Amino acid sequence: MAEQLFAKYAVPLIFLKNNGHQGCPPATQISKSKMNHTFFQYSFEKEQNCILAPTTHVTIIMLYNQSAISQASMHGLVTAPRKLHFPKHSTLYCVQMDPLDALVLLGQEALIALLDSSKPLRQVIDLDLSAIETLDPQTDLHQKAGSFEELFAPEQALLPQHCILNNILTCIHNANDKIKVSDLSMQTGYSDRQLYQIFKNNFGIGIKLYSRIMRFQNSLKWLSGVNSDLITLACSLGYYDQAHFMHEFKTLSTLTPLEYQSSQLR
């Protein structure tokens, strides 16, 4: 898109809960594109049971077994943790798209149909996918990213509703995902009810849930650091207190903050 929503770096796509609480093998490569898509590549030597964390991004997952692609799927916005399974000796190539980029590409109906679910990529997008499906898993991630962006470069013109949503999302992110709907109403000139309907009709979720997931995503980034204090973190992210933060984190991840933080250090 000519105008991007925000330039925040995407949080780790997947964390694991396997044989207790084990950290996800770090992405072997991570790349940020000029179109603001984020590309991840993971290599799994052992069979892995993973949890797809709640996210406000749309995610394309391409799974390679040895040199052949075995699965290509698109996952919509995720509001609750979802279990995924990956076989041993596999390579996982993932692309995260901002929600407005996905809306422009897919349209309202297709994007909402993907909420908390996934579909084979060929069922979602009517494009010739051979250029990315035939990529060798050993190909450099930047080259893969280039092939992806060449294929998925949006040709549609922005509609008025896209510009409205861009304004709403920009306000949310400028407020570090802690903005009240009433404040958002004052900034955009739309009533609370209008804002809810605009957002819900395009993304399938309300503004409050969107902000809640974004706040959770930000907490993952904080917890991936060293010596993150939970009380300070809870206050910085706008939670009522540490207990509220821990309850929200457990609900959205199946892990406590300390379990997640410990898993990242292994």
Image (cartoon, rainbow, N blue to C red):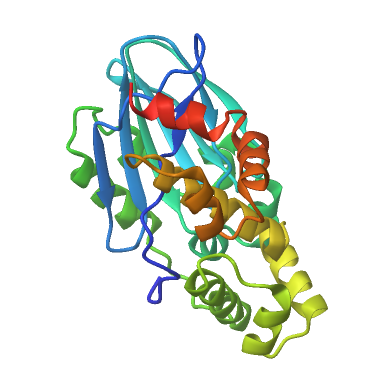
Residue 5, x across and y down, in percent: 45, 70
User: Residue 11, how many percent across, how many down?
Assistant: 42, 46
Does 258 sit left or right of 137 as displayed? right
Q: Nearer the viewer, residue 49 or 239?
A: 239
The quarter of the rendered structure image containing the N terminus is bottom left
Residue at position x 51%, y 78% from top? 158
Residue 218: in sight, yes or no?
yes
Left or right of residue 35, residue 70 in this image: right
Instruction: Using the rendered view, name the quadrant where residue 128 is placed.
Output: top left
Q: Residue at x 50, y 59 (%)?
A: 236
Q: Is residue 18 above or below residue 39?
A: above
In the figure, 80 relative to 88: above or below? below
Q: Is residue 126 visible?
A: no
Residue at point 78%, 84% (across, down) = 191
Q: Position of residue 50 (x, y in %)?
A: 50, 23
- Residue 192, image x and y in percent? 78, 78
What is the quadrant of residue 149 in the picture? bottom left
> Quarter of the image holding residue 23?
top left
> Count the marks: how many?
0
Extreme residue in the right direction: 193
Residue 228 vertical position relative to residue 151 in the rendered view, above or below: above
Left or right? Give the position of 11 relative to 217.
left
Residue nearer the viewer, 220 or 247: 247
The residue lying toward the viewer, choosing from 129 and 224, is 224
- In which quadrant is the C terminus drawn? top left
Please indicate whether residue 30 sits to the left or right of residue 170 in the image: left
With respect to residue 235, does 64 lie above or below?
above
Residue visible at 43% across and 12% down in the picture: 87
**Towards the viewer: 201 or 230:** 230
